[in-house]
Amino acid sequence: MTKREGRLAGKVAVVTGGAAGMGRGTVERFVQEGAQVVIADVQEERGLALAEQLGEDAGFVRADVSKEEDVEAMIALAVERYGRLDCLFNNAGYIGVLGEIDELEIAEEYDRTIGVMLTGPVLGMKHAARVMKEQGSGSIISTASVAGIRGDFGPHVYCAVKAAVINLTRSVALELGKDNIRVNCICPGAIATEIFGGLHTLSEEQKLRVPEVMRKVFPMMQAIPRAGEGADIAAMAVFLASDDSTFVTGQAMVVDGGLTAGSVPDPEGSPVMQLLEAEFGSTK
């Protein structure tokens, strides 16, 4: 067997929502860093194609994270195929149910939102912890959001669920620390992915174009004048999955280009001014 190299050499991970967006970027980076990865997603075609591209170091399983049998099966696959489980990244998610609070429908889409983005991490933690306790080690990571820190970065239910993931992370970290299991979450800011297509009624082809549109808008919103990318989240996930973070647990790691630090000053020559001048001509 070829000797593995990288920060995750010899480690085994499961990444939910791993077929696209931040999940895909993390899967690719994990493999580059020496890990073997199970890609779990409901997008079968994209997941299978990614696994084939990455070769023997990656496998795909269709998993709806709101269903316990699917979560149990994806964890079991990692152990059966690669012999252990060192990292679970609860990343699957979407925008979820929309609507102003007085018009919000507490119906199927509401239940689905809670199921994928809150029940999913709970189930992932449950079944990963069983394996990791026996090993005496492990890292559980979940995708939260800056929307879980502030109330103006997403739809109402999305904000509420992401805040719940942050406190779930803290609570479970306190329980599992004695077992040498770390539990953290990542709070992405303005990351250019297809998820923002969920704010509008778009075709699948249109959703594929959403990241490029977001890359034009996001640089004007934060201190670092570029859109966040899946690779930025993957870099934080590598840190939390690696032995570099063995003293880090119960934390919500914000990766947002300075978005939550405050409003960006708008001096002449800023991206906003440049956009206005491009649209309306010079103001000088």
Image (cartoon, helix red, strand yellow):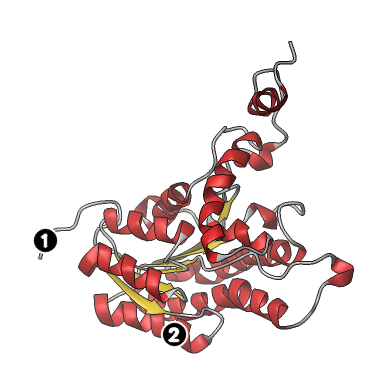
Q: Are marks 1 and 2 in contact (CB under 8 Å)?
A: no
Position of residue 209 in the picture relative to residue 234 (left or right): right
Position of residue 136 in the picture relative to residue 274 (left or right): left
Q: Which of 280 and 24 is in front in this view?
A: 280
Label 1 residue SS: loop
Q: What residue type is labelled 2?
A: Glu
Q: Residue at x 72, y 77 (%)?
A: 110
Q: Is residue 64 above or below residue 178?
A: below
Label 2 residue SS: helix
Image quadrant assignment for residue 259: top right
> What percent of the width, then of the height, locates residue 120?
56, 76
Per the image, the residue denoted by label 1 is 2
Per the image, the residue denoted by label 2 is 72
Q: How many marks?
A: 2
Image quadrant assignment for residue 250: bottom right
Q: Residues within 10 Å of mark 1 (few under 14, many from 20)?
A: few
Q: Which residue is drawn at 75% across and 15% down?
A: 283
